Amino acid sequence: MILLDLLWKFFQIGLFAVGGGLATLPFLYEMSETTKWFSTTDITNMIAISQSTPGPIGVNMATYVGFLVEGVGGAVVATTGLVLPSILVIVAVSHMLERFKESQVVQAIFLGLRPASAGLILASGLSVATITFFNETVYQTTGNWISGLNVKAIVLAAGIVFLSRKKKVHPILMIVIAAALGIVFQF
Amino acid sequence: MKEWIQLFGTFAKIGAFTFGGGYAMLPMLQREIVEHKQWATEEELMDYFAIGQCTPGVIAVNTATFIGYKQKKMLGGVVATAGVIAPSLLIIVLLAAFLSNFSSNPYVISAFNGIQVCVCVQIMEAVWGMMKKSVSTRSTMGIFVVVVFLSYFSLASPVLLVIAAGLVGIVISGIQRKRGV
């Protein structure tokens, strides 16, 4: 039964892919090889679509693969399989946190965890910023790092900082505005 | 019933505008969950992200489950997760069925590049807010700087960093207690 197989395979991915959507990739390559349900070209398409549509990348990829294999039912089943382990694990963790919230050890762990959490997010923001505001191929051909700067992106970023600080524009509205400006000024 | 619909709807809205990985949803969580609905505090959000890093699964789903559970126990976790993945399911199925060359469309690429700039700025602003709350002493500053460095240059995996930071937290608290602070 292919649906059950899909559910089980994506349940395993959800259980073992630690650290976000792209961590599911190696599992998908392996699945393509062993099941022949989809090709590696399909995976490349899937990454492109997952990254240019809303939603967490891991969920998008599961939905896409599920749909390729078994239509709408497959999409629902693969996605359900992917998120089930998360739900089970997080519910268990939440339950324990509630019980031991006042414990000194848990408090101490969070004292270290919070700055680390902020640090991880900043690091990933910086990685995205590097490719967004700096064009490495231009830099390598000209050898002049100023020419590698993406001026359009920097101007847009400054505008967004202004809108969010001074005008308190809602983050969702800002995304819509940025998409529109991206199209108008051909980013 | 109204509360359940709100829980589902809020997360569906966030899911529909999260471009990229789980971090991209942080600015919206801060605005919608912390400021508007007050379902969680800024500190709790940071805890959820840290734990979501080193537990299996997609970070966005982990965070949704945490907040849903806090509101309405297990079923709340399921409903919040269903909300955050519903837009993905719908959009991807439609695209896969009708528009397989969607992502090579020049307008889509331009729009996405604009969005990427926006998400980048929003993440930085979100981190700034988090830093003010969690990086207040020399030792927490130390953890923050080391994690940024090791993670940006991919010298250590997030899982390892989160576990190490938790241990450092225990050591720091132990020292503070010994000094009688």
Image (spheres, coloured by chain):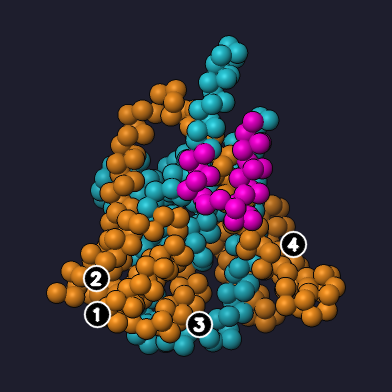
Q: Please indicate whether residue B1 sits to the left or right of residue B96 in the image.
A: left
Q: Are marks 2 and 4 on the same chain?
A: yes
Mark 1 or mark 2, earlier in chain? 2
- Whether tag 1 and tag 2 are in contact, CB under 8 A, the answer is yes
- Whether tag 2 and tag 4 are in contact, CB under 8 A, the answer is no
Image mark 4: chain:
A
Q: Are marks 2 and 3 on the same chain?
A: no
Question: In percent of the image, x 50 and y 46: which residue is there?
Answer: B160
Q: CA distance from mark 3 to mark 1?
A: 22 Å
Q: Which chain is cyan?
A: B
Q: CA distance from mark 1 to mark 2?
A: 9 Å
Q: CA distance from mark 1 to mark 4?
A: 45 Å
**The residue tagged with tag 2: helix, strand or loop?**
helix
**Label 1, residues with CA under 10 Å away: few <14, some 14-19, many ≥20:** some
Residue that numbered label 3 is attached to? B103
Q: Based on the displayed image, in which of its 4 quarters is residue B12 positioned?
A: bottom left
Mark 1 or mark 4, earlier in chain? 1
Mark 2 or mark 4, earlier in chain? 2
Q: Nearer the viewer, residue A157 or A58?
A: A58
Which of discs 2 and 4 lies nearer the camera? The answer is 2
Residue that numbered label 1 is attached to? A70
Q: CA distance from mark 4 to mark 3?
A: 27 Å
Task: Identify the magenta region.
Answer: B139-164
Q: Which amino acid is tagged 3?
A: Ser
Q: Which amino acid is tagged 1?
A: Glu
* Magenta part, dominant SS: helix
Q: Are marks 1 and 4 on the same chain?
A: yes
Q: Which amino acid is tagged 4?
A: Ala
Q: Are marks 3 and 1 on the same chain?
A: no
